Image (cartoon, rainbow, N blue to C red):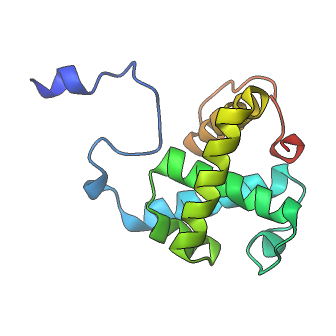
Amino acid sequence: MPHADIYRPDQVRTLRYQRPHLRPTRQVQADARKIIELVSAQCSLELSVLLSDTRTQRVSQVRWVAMYLLNHLLHMSSTEIGTALNRDHTTILHGLKRVRDQRTADPIYAERLDGVAREISDEVLGACGSGPKSGRVGDVQ
């Protein structure tokens, strides 16, 4: 199958290169940091609290959203996400499972999370005309 048939420009945009092994590690780390900062700002949570050892439910849920977005938008491994969030990779796997289960159980949560993912993807990619803000991450239960 020709390369042009596999990667069409009309496919869903993500921050992942078509050949991720060619993507500079520094760029992935910079994008990860920006996503973490945007999630923190959107949830009205200080970045230092998000990256701290705090384990309250609200902070954990915001962290889970950040984990999901790093995995979904940047296609980072659990080890890479753990390094970015100062967590162990097994904690990242648990957080990703919690978000996946919540998305399955609650369609409103899934819709809000998808809106936030689009919003942050547009902002990190620098796309024009991102439109009105859909659900805020902090509103997701």
Residue at 60% x, 70% y is 91
Residue at 46% x, 60% y is 28
Q: Residue furthest bottom?
A: 53
Q: Is residue 34 left or right of residue 40?
A: left
Total residue callouts: 0
Residue at 83% x, 55% y is 41
Q: Is residue 16 left or right of residue 91?
A: left
In which quadrant of the rendered view does residue 140 lie? Answer: top right
In which quadrant of the rendered view does residue 100 lie? Answer: top right
Q: Nearer the viewer, residue 4 or 60?
A: 60
Q: Position of residue 134 (x, y in %)?
A: 80, 28
Q: Quadrant of the C terminus?
A: top right
Q: Position of residue 117 (x, y in %)?
A: 65, 38
Q: Is residue 75 left or right of residue 54?
A: left
Q: Is residue 133 left or right of residue 118?
A: right
Asked if residue 119 can be seen in this view, the reply is no
Q: Nearer the viewer, residue 3 or 140?
A: 140
Residue at 48% x, 65% y is 78
Asked if residue 83 can be seen in this view, the reply is yes
Q: Position of residue 64 (x, y in %)?
A: 69, 57
Q: Quadrant of the N terminus?
A: top left
Where 66 falls versus 4 (above or below)? below
Q: Position of residue 34 (x, y in %)?
A: 64, 58
